[in-house]
Image: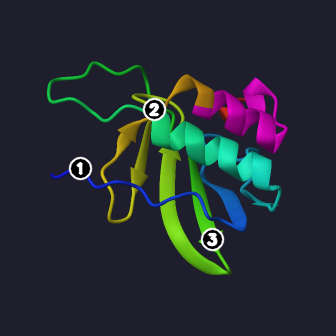
Amino acid sequence: MPIVQLPDNNFSKLIIYRTRYTHEDTAFFTKVITDQSTIKKLYSDIKSSDFWKPGVYNCPEDNGIEYVLNFYSNDVLTVHSILNVTGCRSIRFTKYTGRRASSSLIEDLQQTLDLSKQEFYGYQ
């Protein structure tokens, strides 16, 4: 799969939602971010995440928690990404090559969502 560069950070809005969970009491939720510095920081974390290298990976247990990060420019969806925060911790894109999710991306997202570690990872 060819490596395609992600577009520049010209986003007006970021919508984040959790789509999968591990426990019935781990709620789905949606958060809309319009603060430009927060959007730039998260997108920078994504762009600085490493590409997957060929090989076999032995990943820790994946509990299924996924966060969708949709970046918008003038109300037009520009980048759709799906972040797995457990297991091999990857971020995938529509039309773009997936990457390994960096620790800074995981930490900054947890802080942005104002969730405890337990809540963020879906443990009650």
* Disc 3 element: strand
Residue found 41% across the figure and 56% down from its top = 6
Q: Determine the CA span between mark 2 and mark 3.
A: 23 Å
Asked if residue 65 can be seen in this view, the reply is no
Quadrant of residue 89 in the image? top left
Badge 2 is on which residue?
89
Q: Mark 1 highlights which residue?
A: 3
Mark 2 surroundings within 10 Å by alpha-carbon count, few (fewer than 14), some (14 through 19), many (20 or more) = some
Q: Name the residue under label 3.
A: 72
Is 109 rendered above or below residue 80?
above
Q: Is residue 21 magenta?
A: no
Q: Which residue lies furthest to the bottom in this view?
A: 75
Kind of element beneath mark 2: loop
Q: Earlier in the sequence, mark 3 or mark 1?
A: 1
Of 52 and 11, which appears nearest the observer? 11
Q: Which of 47 and 88 is in front in this view?
A: 47
> Residue at image x 17%, y 52%?
2
Q: Real-space Cα distance between discs 3 and 1?
A: 22 Å
Q: Which amino acid does label 1 sit on?
A: Ile
